[in-house]
Image (spheres, rainbow, N blue to C red):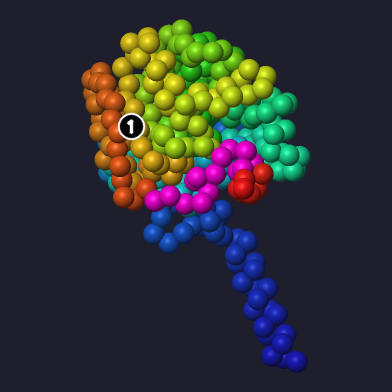
């Protein structure tokens, strides 16, 4: 009886000690970086951001804000992929800021049962709009607290994966076109660069157009991507998501310098490629931060981009729970 009581008492003690640990300590993976966490806005729920500080910061105090992917129904700012991304950028001297944003499809059980519902109701547009608003609020908080963070807000780069890539591209498009979704941005602020991995822009018009210049942009996209289509994905109510292929054409029509890296035969694998493309990321970032205007149109292959089942399904199949059409 004493032995049983001892084990119960010991277990209870471990539970209490675990609950008393700092929040960041309990969420760590061995070998991945630690961070400081701050609340940046209160919506219907509090939204937080994680700040990773490099051991050897860049002299120009540049920072990268990164947004996770997950189809606007899943994903976390501090998941393993986000921490691996942070580690790759920290090693290059960037301060890294990984943010929350509201997931408009997270609690929508109807979407899981009917993969086409979000198209017919405008729900997908709503998801993008609120994510853009939250990203704008995070930028505003970072700019207001740049002294404490020891960064230069004019040298803040935006990047993201999949849904996060859509969000950062959409934010800069809304900013350039003076749209209300970007109204929380500090007046006159512009990203130092935008680097989306498998992203796109939602627009109700037949062609994209920038009323003012976008931030320097490097588009990364697989031409076989069926989750975020490389060209465009149509909506019944006339809204369309224009992928990197269409964004590239829009920028070319307006003589806007930019980079596009295309991948033949590759699908949505590119969404998770930031840590594997850190040299390319930093080359573009360094040129941009030096004020150099460059243009690049390249097709790449990389043996590390290996196809998998989920990266080759379509958007509708993803929202249907991964069931492939026969």
Q: Nearer the viewer, residue 122 or 30?
A: 122
Along the viewing direction, whichever of 148 and 273 lies nearer the viewer = 273
| Residue 92 seen | yes
109 sits left or right of 84 in the view? right
Which residue is rendered at x = 52% and y = 10% of the image? 178
Q: Callout 1: helix, strand or loop?
A: strand
Using a 10 Å C-alpha cutoff, classify the residue at mark 1 as few (fewer than 14 neighbours), some (14 to 19) or many (20 or more).
some
Quadrant housing residue 51: top left
Residue extending furthest toward the front: 326
Against 177, residue 275 (above or below) is below
Report the side of 175 relative to 240 (left or right): left
- Residues in magenta? 306-319
Name the image quarter holding residue 192.
top left
Viewer-closest of 32 and 8: 32
Residue 271 picture quarter: top left
Asked if 303 appears above or below 3 in the picture, the reply is above
The image shows residue 324 at horizontal and vertical percentages of 60, 48
Q: Does the magenta stretch include residue 308?
A: yes
């Amino acid at each position: 009886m004493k032995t049983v009581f001892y084990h119960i008492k010991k277990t209870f003690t471990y539970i209490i000690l675990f609950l008393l640990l700092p929040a960041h300590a309990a969420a760590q993976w061995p070998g991945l970086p630690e961070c400081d966490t701050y609340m940046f806005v209160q919506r219907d729920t509090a939204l937080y951001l994680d700040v990773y500080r490099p051991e050897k910061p860049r002299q120009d105090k540049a920072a990268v804000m990164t947004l996770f992917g997950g189809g606007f129904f899943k994903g976390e700012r501090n998941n393993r992929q986000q921490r691996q991304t942070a580690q790759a950028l920290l090693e290059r001297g960037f301060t890294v800021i990984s943010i929350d944003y509201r997931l408009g499809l997270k609690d929508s059980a109807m979407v899981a049962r009917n993969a086409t519902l979000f198209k017919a109701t405008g729900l997908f547009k709503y998801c993008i709009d609120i994510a853009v608003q939250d990203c704008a609020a995070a930028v505003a908080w970072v700019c207001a607290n740049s002294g404490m963070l020891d960064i230069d807000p004019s040298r803040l780069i935006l990047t993201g994966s999949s849904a996060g890539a859509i969000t950062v591209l959409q934010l800069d498009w809304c900013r350039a076109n003076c749209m209300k979704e970007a109204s929380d941005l500090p007046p006159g602020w512009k990203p130092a660069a935008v680097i989306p991995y498998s992203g796109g822009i939602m627009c109700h018009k037949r062609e994209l157009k920038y009323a003012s210049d976008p931030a320097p942009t490097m588009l990364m996209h697989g031409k076989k991507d069926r989750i975020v289509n490389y060209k465009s994905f149509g909506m019944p109510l006339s809204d369309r998501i224009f992928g990197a292929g269409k964004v590239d054409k829009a920028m070319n029509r307006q003589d806007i310098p930019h980079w596009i890296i295309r991948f033949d035969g590759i699908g949505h694998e590119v969404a998770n490629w930031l840590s594997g493309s850190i040299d390319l990321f930093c080359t573009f970032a360094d040129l941009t931060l030096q004020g150099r205007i460059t243009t690049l149109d390249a097709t790449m292959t990389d043996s590390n981009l290996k196809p998998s089942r989920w990266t080759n399904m379509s958007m509708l199949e993803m929202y249907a729970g991964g069931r492939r059409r026969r």
